[in-house]
Every structure is written in structure tokens, then in C-alpha cells.
Image (cartoon, helix red, strand yellow):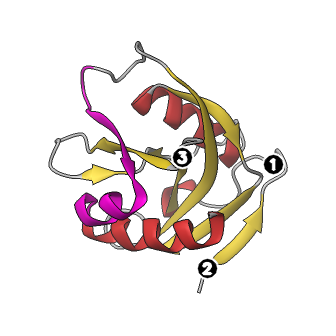
Amino acid sequence: MLNVKQNYKRLAPGNIQDYQVGVFAFTKHRKLVLITSKKAESWILPKGNPEKTRSDREQAREEAFEEAGLEGTVNWKYYEFDVHGKVKKLRIFPMKVENLLDDYPEKNKRKRILIPFGKAEKIAAKEMSGIIRKLRKVNF
């Protein structure tokens, strides 16, 4: 079951170490943007840690720009997933990609691909694959 919530410019609530924020970034041609993890071991969605000084939505937009060179419209709704590892939850905001920049802060640290949803589910990190599958169903 998907937990859908709204985030209207509120600052990050509660303990920001308990979750990360990211984007489900898709193009008008129905392709998903994936990036490699920092160690380049797996394909993931752009994501990162929230900051107390900005909303989760703004932070998700910033992560998309820094990690993948994305500009676009970030939805007010987010989907929250339970995850395993360093953090307990992942808040994902749908993002309609309007620009793919050639130059962005982590360009030399990560690879970026645009890929059809079905293929993205197959190559993404195990936990990300399930998230992609669920978000694809509610966004298309």
C-alpha cells in the first residue's frame, strides 16, 4: 500500500535522520531517469538527506539537480516507502523533467540514464525496483 501525503512548502518535520527525500523523474516520452549510487554499484533514483532549512519538496528538487542535472516540475504529493539500511523511510516526489543539463555538480561522480520503466525495474537496485513499479502504476 502506498502512503500518499502532501508537502506545501513546509520545512522538514521531526527527526531528519529517519528518512531521505528523492524524485521519481520521468520525461514526456515516458522514460525514467536513474543514476548510479555513489559507489557506482547500482542504479537508483536521485535522493538525499533532508535539511531543516528547506521543505522536503525543495530538497528533492535540489537532489535531482545536483545528482542528475534535472530541472522540472516537482509534484506537491509524495509517496513514502519503508526501506532498509541507514534510513527508515524514503519520501519520493514525482518530477516531470523539463531539462536535462549537461553540466551539474555530481556529473563526474555518477552515471545517468533515461530508460523505459520496464527496463528500469529490471536494472534498478532491488529495493528501488519495487518502488519504481509502484510509482509507475500511480503516475501513468
Tell me the amino acid under the disc marked 1: Arg
Residue where numbered disc 1 is placed:
10
User: Magenta span covers which residues?
Assistant: 108-125
Mark-to-mark CA distance, 3 and 1: 24 Å
User: What is the crowding at mark 2: few (fewer than 14 residues within 10 Å), some, or many (at least 20)?
Assistant: few
Q: Residue at x 27, y 51 (%)?
A: 43
Tell me the amino acid under the disc marked 2: Leu
Instruction: Quadrant for the C terminus, please.
Output: bottom right
- Given this view, does label 3 or label 1 mark the residue nearer the observer? 3
Residue where numbered disc 2 is placed:
2
Tell me the amino acid under the disc marked 3: Phe
Mark-to-mark CA distance, 3 and 2: 19 Å
Does 119 sit left or right of 77 as displayed?
A: left
Residue where numbered disc 3 is placed:
26
The spot of residue 18 in percent (x, y) is 51, 64
User: What is the crowding at mark 1: few (fewer than 14 residues within 10 Å), some, or many (at least 20)?
Assistant: some
